[in-house]
C-alpha cells in the first residue's frame, strides 16, 4: 500500500514555509521534509500583496520539497494553504428555530440554524467558518444537539470573518502542477489551537497568542470552543525596524542582532556588553508594547468577566506560538519572552492598574499560553508600569 502524505504551506509575512508529512493508518504524522523561502514585502500583515512574486516563491518552495531526499521522486499534486492576516476576526452570533411539532434534531437542523445565525450578521467580510459554542433544546442546554428531540432549538456561534481580498488573492496564486481543485484552505488560528491546546485546556478556558512577523493573533477558548479572536497589526518586524533606525543598521544586521542577542525579558544581571544592553532595551520596549496591546483588548476583558472568580485570580503560565519561527521570532529564540499577567485587568492610558476585586476586572479562569519550541516556565509578575 502506497504511503499517504500531506503537504501544508505557511504563507507568512517574513517567509514561505512548507512541510511534507506521512500519515499512518491511525492518523499519526511523521514529518518528512521542511523547506522555506523568503517572502519579505510580498506578504504584508498576513495578506498576499504581490500575487506574482508569491506564486514564484511557492513554486520554488514546491521544487525544494520535491527535491528533498525524503520526498523524491514523488511529485506534489495537492497542498493546504492558510487563511489569516490582519483582517481575520471573530463575530458572535446566535439564532433560534421554532418547530410546530417535536422532531429529532439532525445535522440538517443544525445547518439550518447556522444559516439563520449568518443571515442576521451584517459585515463586508467573508464568513470563513461557523463554530458552535452552545446549544439549547427546549430551553435546556445540551452539549450536542444532534440526536435530541424538541420543538425549540437555540444556539450561540462564533463566526470567523476575513476580508474578501485575502481569499481572492489566495485563489489567484498559481502553483505549477497543482490545479485549483488540489488546493485546500484552512484557518491558521484554528489549526494552531488544535495542535497546541488540549481538550481540557479548551474546556476550562485559555488564551492562545500567536506572534508573527507583522501580526499577533489572540484566540480565546472557553467551554471547549473558540469564543473570541482578534488580530493585532503588531509583530516581530517592528523590533527589527526599531534596531535599524535606533542603531543605524541594515535589516539583515538588525535581524541578526535581534535573534542572536535579543532578550525580551530583563535578565537577572546586567549584560556586560554595552551593545547587548542597548539591543535589549529596544527589544524589551517593543515587546512590552505588544503585550500591553494584548491586555488592552476590550473583548478579551469582556470574555474574562464571564468566568471571573470571586475569591482569587488565577494568573497564568505564559507560553507563545510564533508564526515566524527561526530568524524572525520577534523575541530571541533562546528565551520565551513574556511574563504571566492576569487577564481582564483594567487599563488606562499611560499606565496599568491591576485590581483583584471581581467587580472592577474579570479574570479568565484559565491559563494563557504562549507556545514556542523553546518554551520554559515564566514568572507571574504583571508588566512593569510605564509612562508615555
Image (cartoon, rainbow, N blue to C red):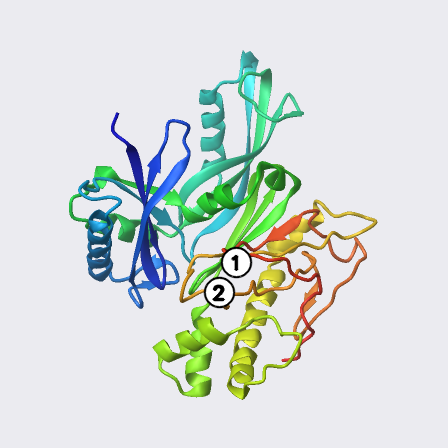
Residue 313 is situated, as x and y percent measured from the top left of the image, at 76, 53
Q: Position of residue 274 (x, y in %)?
A: 54, 88
Q: Earlier in the sequence, mark 2 or mark 1?
A: 2
Q: Where is mark 2, residue-wise?
A: 333
Mark 2 and mark 1: span between their CA atoms? 7 Å
Residue 115 sits in quarter: top left
Give the side of residue 355 with respect to residue 306, left or right.
Answer: right
- Label 2: how many residues lie within 10 Å, few (<14), some (14-19) or many (20+)? many
Which of the 4 quarters of the picture holds residue 16?
A: bottom left
Looking at the image, the residue that sits furthest to the right is: 311
Q: Nearer the viewer, residue 380 or 105?
A: 380
- Dot 1 alpha-carbon crowd within 10 angstroms: few under 14, some 14 to 19, many 20 or more: few
Disc 1, SS: loop
Measuring from the top left, give residue 364's x and y in whole percent.
69, 49
From what the image shows, is residue 306 above or below residue 58? above
Q: Is residue 54 visible?
A: yes
Confirm whether residue 122 shows in the render. Answer: no
- Which one is nearer the viewer's eye here, 189 or 243? 243
**Residues at discs 2 and 1 in contact (Cβ within 8 Å):** yes
Q: What residue would you read off at disc 1?
A: 374
Amino acid at each position: 500500500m502506497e504511503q499517504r502524505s500531506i503537504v501544508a504551506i505557511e504563507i507568512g509575512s517574513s517567509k514561505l514555509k512548507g512541510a511534507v508529512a506521512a500519515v499512518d493508518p491511525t492518523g499519526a504524522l511523521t514529518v518528512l521534509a521542511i523547506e522555506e523561502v523568503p517572502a519579505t514585502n510580498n506578504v504584508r500583515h498576513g495578506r498576499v500583496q504581490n500575487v506574482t512574486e508569491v506564486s514564484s516563491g511557492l513554486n520554488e518552495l514546491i521544487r525544494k520539497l520535491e527535491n528533498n531526499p525524503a520526498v523524491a521522486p514523488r511529485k506534489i499534486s495537492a497542498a493546504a494553504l492558510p487563511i489569516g492576516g490582519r483582517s481575520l476576526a471573530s463575530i458572535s452570533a446566535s439564532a433560534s428555530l421554532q418547530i410546530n411539532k417535536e422532531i429529532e434534531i439532525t445535522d440538517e437542523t443544525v445547518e439550518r440554524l447556522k444559516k439563520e445565525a449568518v443571515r442576521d450578521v451584517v459585515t463586508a467580510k467573508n464568513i470563513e467558518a461557523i463554530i458552535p459554542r452552545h446549544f439549547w433544546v427546549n430551553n435546556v442546554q445540551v452539549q450536542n444537539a444532534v440526536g435530541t428531540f424538541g420543538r425549540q432549538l437555540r444556539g450561540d456561534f462564533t463566526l470567523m470573518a476575513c476580508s474578501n481580498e485575502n481569499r481572492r488573492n489566495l485563489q489567484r496564486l498559481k502553483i505549477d502542477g497543482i490545479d485549483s481543485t488540489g488546493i485546500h484552505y484552512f484557518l491558521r488560528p484554528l489549526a494552531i489551537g488544535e495542535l497546541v491546546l488540549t481538550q481540557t485546556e479548551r474546556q476550562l478556558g485559555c488564551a492562545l497568542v500567536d506572534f508573527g512577523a507583522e501580526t499577533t493573533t489572540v484566540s480565546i477558548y472557553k467551554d471547549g470552543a473558540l469564543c473570541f479572536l482578534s488580530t493585532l497589526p503588531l509583530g516581530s518586524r517592528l523590533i527589527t525596524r526599531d534596531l535599524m533606525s535606533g542603531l543605524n543598521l541594515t535589516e539583515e544586521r538588525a535581524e541578526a542582532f535581534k535573534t542572536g542577542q535579543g532578550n525580551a525579558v530583563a535578565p537577572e544581571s546586567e549584560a556586560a556588553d554595552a551593545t547587548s544592553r542597548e539591543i535589549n532595551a529596544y527589544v524589551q520596549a517593543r515587546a512590552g508594547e505588544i503585550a500591553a496591546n494584548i491586555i488592552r483588548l476590550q473583548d478579551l476583558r469582556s470574555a474574562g468577566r464571564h468566568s471571573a472568580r470571586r475569591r482569587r485570580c488565577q494568573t497564568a503560565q505564559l507560553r507563545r506560538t510564533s508564526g515566524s519561527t527561526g530568524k524572525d521570532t520577534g523575541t530571541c529564540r533562546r528565551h520565551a519572552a513574556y511574563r504571566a499577567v492576569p487577564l481582564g485587568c483594567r487599563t488606562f492610558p499611560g499606565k496599568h492598574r491591576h485590581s483583584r476585586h471581581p467587580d472592577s476586572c474579570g479574570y479568565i479562569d484559565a491559563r494563557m499560553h504562549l507556545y514556542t519550541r523553546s518554551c520554559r516556565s515564566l514568572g507571574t509578575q504583571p508588566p512593569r508600569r510605564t509612562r508615555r
